[in-house]
Amino acid sequence: MRITLLLPAALVMIGTAGPVLASSCSEQIATIERRLDSAGAEQVTGKEPPGGPTSSNSPKALAKAPDVKPTDPATTASAGGVAQARDLIKKARAQDKAGDMKGCEDTMTEAKTKAGALP
């Protein structure tokens, strides 16, 4: 009888001891970091990202960023905006680590706005 009571509790413990999954905010951080390290960001800032521009390693990826402007001029990227977005990502990473998902998501929304529409 005692074993049958322990089995469900043991199964619950095993289920909660699984690997920690990445939060949606940490996934957003990784995505925006790749954009800020892209050839398009390099075109905007005039600086090569640390480690060189990232690549999607996709056969459909463009060799260089297209020379086009966004349809909404308010979303135009700037070197200052990219720098501000990088600072906001540091803040979001700290919020994510502290478990402040709402704060992290709000900070990432602001980071995306600051980065603008990168080519």
Image (tube, rainbow, N blue to C red):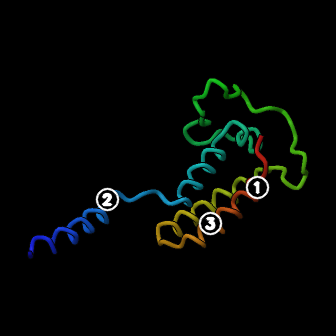
Amino acid of disc 1? Gly
Amino acid of disc 2? Gly
Answer with mark 1 or mark 3, whichever residue precedes in sequence. Answer: 1
Mark 1 or 2: the one toward you: 2
Q: Which residue is more in the foreground, 92 or 60?
A: 60
Q: Do the residues labelled 3 and 2 touch (CB within 8 Å)?
A: no
* Distance between the alpha carbons at the discs numbered 1 and 2: 42 Å
Percent across and percent down for residue 104 are 59, 67
Label drawn at residue 105: 3
Label drawn at residue 41: none
Q: Residue at x 24, y 65 (%)?
A: 11
Percent across and percent down for residue 69 are 87, 41
Mark 3 or 2: the one toward you: 2
Splitting the image into 4 quarters, where does residue 118 fall? Answer: top right
Label drawn at residue 80: 1
Splitting the image into 4 quarters, where does residue 4 fall? Answer: bottom left
Query: Regarding mark 1 in the picture, which secondary structure is present there?
Result: helix
Query: Regarding mark 2 in the picture, which secondary structure is present there?
Result: loop
Splitting the image into 4 quarters, where does residue 19 fall? Answer: bottom left
Amino acid of disc 3? Glu
Percent across and percent down for residue 90 are 57, 62
Q: Residue at x 84, y 53 (%)?
A: 75
Q: Residue at x 64, y 56 (%)?
A: 86
* Distance between the alpha carbons at the discs numbered 1 and 3: 21 Å
Other-residue count near label 3 (Cα within 10 Å), few / some / many at <14 / 14–19 / ≥20 = some
Q: Residue at x 61, y 44 (%)?
A: 34
Answer with mark 1 or mark 2, whichever residue precedes in sequence. Answer: 2
Query: Regarding mark 3 in the picture, which secondary structure is present there?
Result: helix
Q: Name the residue under label 2.
A: 18
